[in-house]
Image (spheres, rainbow, N blue to C red):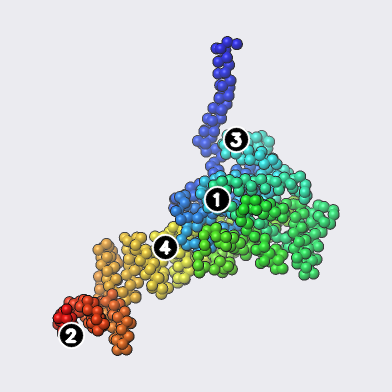
Amino acid sequence: MTAAQSRIKRLFILIVILVPLLFLFVLEGSLRLIDYGGDLSLFVPARGEDAGLLTINPNVGQRYFGKQKTIPSPTKDLFLEEKPEKGYRIFVMGGSSAAGYPYGNNLKFSRILAFRLQEMYPEKTIEVVNVALSAVGSYTLLDFTDEVLEQEPDAILIYAGHNEYYGALGVASMESFGRKPWLVRSYLRLNQFRTFRLMRNMVQSIRGEGTTDQLNSASQDPTGTLMERIVGEQNIPTRSKLYEEGRLQFESNLSSIIDLARGQNVEVILSELVSNIKDQAPFVSLENNNEENALYLYQQAQKYEQASSYSEARAAYTLAKNHDALRFRASEDINEIIHALARENELLVVPMLSAFEKEATNGLVGNELMVDHLHPNMDGYFLMADAFFKTLVNNRVLDAPRRGVDITDAHGWKSRWAISCLDSTVSDLNIMYLKGGWPFKAHWEPNRSLETYKNNTPVKDLALKVLTNPELGLEQAHVLLAAHYRSLNDKQRAAEEYLALIYSIPFELSFYQEALKLLLAEKQYGQARQVLEIAYYYGHDQWAIQWLGQVELWLGDIEQAIASLEQAKNRFPEDAAIITNLYRAYIQVGSIDRAKSLAGEIEVKFPDSKVAKKLKGMQSTVQRLASERTRKLLEKAQTHLQAQEYKQAEDLLLRTLEIQATPTAYRWLGQMAQNQNRVGQATKYYEAGLALQPKDNFMSQALDELRSAK
């Protein structure tokens, strides 16, 4: 072969290689240009009035669920696009329990934790961002990790492990892509490309898969829950190959997450998992021998409990859960992996199991803290938040705790939390629907739970719509219910809906504005101040600060109102409402000179305003108030002088001068200074008094004596 032929051959090979690559490059660019498949980034810019904030992409679940019509959405969390200088940013990762199922945003443990940390560390901007997603396992958490780390977290909290078998990409899931970690991770990396997604969708379409609601690849069931549809391999005996693959999958992915985070000096805090062991019998019992037969062990546990042998009962209940072949509840092997990785990497572990057992009757976790087999109830979520909070604070993850704040006040937080009737109704309906299907009932039975549901009140009707209408979210339902209560002139219950919304999405200004209107109409000034303090923390400072001093005036807390309004005036010196409220506050405490100064400022800055015109007509009233206030203080000072209590008398006389300058005050101050041989001060007081009253013989003679003495 000649040299020319060799070059031609090499060129031909290069073209053969480059043409497909160029085609793929152009195809990928074209698909991105037309936004094929949509943006599946974890974080996207928030819209509207939330400019400058990022939120969790509501479509991110499409990465992991290719065979379901109903795809879980993340909770709505917002956080600042630019991390503040004094910010402390925490990300929460996990499945449905971490996401707060069956409740809304205001009852997930991360929201409760955020508010408690904000109270403990007011000097920091605390952000707790929840990226949890229902029905996902550790592959999803690992897939999120790089994007989470790009947002400069200080800590990552992980509550996960229940979904390792049936969650998306789990070893026994309908949404599986193989059982080898390297294969699934390769799939997730390729899934970032639109070309790969196009090819995947084409293959699924040819095979007749697509987005169908399936149970074990059988017929569609429109009444089935996601819990039911996502299960592939139902029975997984202990120590079976599939069981071990699930354990290894969790350990491998969690270890990789820890390595990535530690590589960027980000603290990782793991948590033990909790299940309902007492009031949830095993779903599937397979083994014939009693030592591993889940149902037999559960019945033995009940006998131990009836005999008050609670330690033995707890051990037997736990074993029964461990040998339940339907792996919706994590076995204790998962908790052992969590502790082993924590020891290996010197990480903190939240003692969640002991926290629940301590609160549970006889140490047996059941329905008093759980709504189903593994999701906490309201008390349980406050308990989860408390366990994470104490782990962070007691280990000084965020520095030393603030003095004067009770870190044990978990129950107190629940009593002042914003929970509306709609929240509890929606959660009850969610659980009723969940338990109306498999595995709580036979898989061939359709879910008829909604057929007996009576939506005979506005609250129940809205709850049903939230469950059945994907276009109506819980937040929108709160707004609709508030409007209904307003139509009935029930301002208190309307306010409760907006308060629940504030605790759900605390960045949304309109929720604060509506809540404040309703609370002020009901003269609920204490609660109004709490709303304003939250609004101030979440960046609505100008609006909040305008109202905070006014509300404190209504509460009669004048000194605090003045402090708030002075701070507001320093930040917003051109705000007429702030200056006017400050003027009124100083009038109330009798600081007339300061009030006069503010009145003059209003007349100069806002000469044509209604406030300025009103102040001109109030000058005689102000003068009268000043004279009256001064007279009373002079009388008190005279009483102290007669009792020879000169320090108290001097303090009162100086206060009168702040309100209104009088010859009497200067005369008495000069006299006290002269008697105490404070010649310089006495001279100044007499001179000021004579400037007001030149014919005062006493001060003239006293001043002459002081001057001649020099």
Counting other residues with Cα less than 10 Å from the Cα at mark 4, is it few (<14), some (14-19), or many (20 or more)? many
- Dot placed on the residue nearer the N-terminal end, 3 or 4: 3
Q: Name the residue rendered at 56%, 66% in the picture.
A: 407
207 relative to 318, above or below: above
- Dot placed on the residue nearer the N-terminal end, 1 or 2: 1
Residue occupying the far front of the picture: 710
| Res. 364 in view | yes
Q: Quadrant of residue 311?
A: bottom right
Task: Report the residue marked by disc 3.
Answer: 196
Give the alpha-carbon distance from disc 4 to disc 2, as whole Å: 54 Å
Q: Which numbered tag is attached to residue 544?
A: 4
Give the alpha-carbon distance from disc 3 to disc 4, as whole Å: 49 Å
Counting other residues with Cα less than 10 Å from the Cα at mark 1, is it few (<14), some (14-19), or many (20 or more)? some
Task: Report the residue marked by disc 1.
Answer: 266
Secondary structure at numbered mark 3: helix
Q: Amino acid at mark 1?
A: Val
| Residue 5: x %, y % from top left | 57, 12
| Residue 45: x %, y % from top left | 48, 47
Task: Report the residue marked by disc 2.
Answer: 698
Secondary structure at numbered mark 2: helix
